[in-house]
Image (cartoon, rainbow, N blue to C red):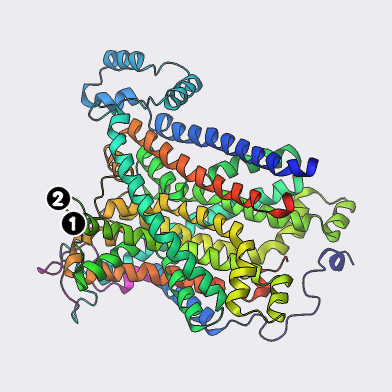
Amino acid sequence: MADTVSHPLSEDKAPEGPKFVFNWVGRVGLAVIVFWAIVAIAGPFLAPHPPGEIVDWDYFGPVTSEFWMGTDYLGRDIFSRIIMGARYTVGIALAAVTLACTIGVLLGMIAAVAGGWFDMILSRLLDAFNGIPSLLFGLVVVAAVGSSIPILIMTLTAIYMPGSYRFARALAVNINTMDFVTVARARGEATPYLILREIFPNILGPVLADLGLRFVFIVLVLSGLSFLGLGVQPPNADWGALVRENIEGLSLGAPAVVFPSIAIASLTISVNMFIDNLPTRIRDRSE
Amino acid sequence: MTRSLLPYILVAQRLGIAFVTLIIVSFAVFFATAMLPGDVAEILLGQAATPEAVAGLREAMGLNEPALSRFVHWLLGLAQGDMGTSYVNNMEVAELIGGRLLNSLRLAGVVTLVSVPVALTLGICAAMWRGSIFDRLVSLLTISVVSVPEFMVATLAVLVFAVWLGWLPALSYGVELDSWSAMLRAYAMPVISLSLVVSAQMIRMSRAAVIETINTPYVEMALLKGASLSRMVLRHALPNALGPIANAVALSLSYLVGGVIIVETIFNYPGVAKLMVDAVSTRDLPLIQSCAMIFCVSYLSLITLADLIAILSNPRLR
């Protein structure tokens, strides 16, 4: 009985058949995301050449059967470097977005349930952090403490946590006033139970959609930082750094600039496509 | 009576929030640049950092004072235009920034003049012919621009206009600006790239604002009375969408702050952002502090302006 009272929003019937139907744009987006995820994991086995090794005397070489995406400014194989770059771009962005959303959503739910001065101070403080432009935030931190992968992850987390907090708090405040939460509270459930069992399941859909969009922003800022030479440091390179390294080849129209750019765009655009075409049932579940 | 005062109270409240935010932001900037890096005196002295020299320099720079008093001191100095001296070449930071700031403002001004009319026209037309081929094309283009990094937009613009078409020089600065056409050509690439970034946001937001007004009952009424599509949008919907559109413009212009950092670096444009990126690589902390504050203040003013417009243009509050 308690179960049906506490979950009036979830489906009573067992899910039958395809519950969430994606249209083809969403499916293409998902396919590209899965593709890059596999590349990021299986990177070393897929790369035809060692990514750091100079394999061709011709710098900014053209697309050939041996070098599928040409060679870079030192004559290294771009195809292999993009595959290895996926690890940095996807990996760092994924770590940062997971951290940012976990912390942000948890704090947001706690603030919504606790209310009072805790909510007010935290909201004001985190809103203030939203008043710092994201790329600038990154620049200042890198200037202060230098750039390494853990620092990049922490910085990107700090930049995008406040937005996630605000989003989750707004959703959680709505759920918090609903009858089933009031009932649970009257039943004498403790705050952790309310947050994890009553509120969290009901904001999960929109929160995941928000996570996707935030992932895109993080990829953009990370690429921007690397492009300025302040992100992932050589000899390693993420996609933004690959564009930076080879920017001189732009006037030659070298494939070395074009393909890393395409890699970034394919990832960000397909995540956007996937989120935009999520069934409204997942995206706006709380509304 | 109290009702007519409401907008002013809200405005005052919003300004108060902006002020508090500014204090917190400046503390964050100060903390990141003055506390995080460790002992500034040691960094400055480098190889020559004997304990005596470090102690002497710490005393001279006032580093022995508590952090809070250093922060207040710095903030008061900043408010009076005293930005300190650069670590790298001992020049006044204000002097280094002066001309650069003018350059950046000029770039931002030209971009605003170009992008606002274009973006609003496209946004309103897209809303008017919603669902048409034109609307879908505009949506597709704006989504693409929004979801790729700014440097890619700029790189693509160089590839198209400088490499393939050969109309414009790829790198803008360093050439003599002796004639109108030379100046136009030098400014063209940064302005085009930055306008693309800013307009994409503006088109999306203004389209959404107009569509929201079109969906109201009174606009539907105008349509039912037999008003033409353009009359319905331009006479009935647009006046009421002006507030949200102005809000959208101010918000999109805040994207200038991030965009300008990338665009100035790519095109070697001598503005504040380029100065700051260079300062980051030499770790010239006073210079970074001041540049960061300039960007934060402009960003904050644009967001606050957007909110104020939204409050003042809402007739329900009057």
Give the spatial CA distance, label 2 vs label 1. Answer: 8 Å
Lateral position of residue B11 relative to residue B301, left or right: right
Q: Is residue B291 magenta?
A: no
Count of marks placed on residues: 2
Query: Tag 2: residue type?
Result: Glu
- Residue A47 shown in magenta: yes
x then y, percent, for residue B231: 60, 74
When the figure is inspected, residue A146 is found, relative to residue A201, above or below; the finding is: above
Decide: is A147 above or below A88: above
Q: Amino acid at mark 1?
A: Ala
Q: Position of residue A159 (x, y in %)?
A: 50, 48
Q: Marks 1 and 2: in contact by CB < 8 Å?
A: yes
Q: Residue most toward the left? A: A57
The one nearer the camera, A198 or B125, is B125
- From the image, tell me which residue sits under label 1: B182
- In terms of secondary structure, where does tag 2 sit? loop
> Measuring 87% from the left and 65% from the top, which residue is drawn there?
A5
Q: Is residue A264 left or right of residue A171?
A: left
Q: Residue B199 location in percent, x, y?
A: 44, 62
| Placement of B184 over or under B10, stated as above or below | below
B132 on left or right of B34: right
What type of secondary structure mainly makes up the magenta span? loop
Magenta residues, as a range? A42-63
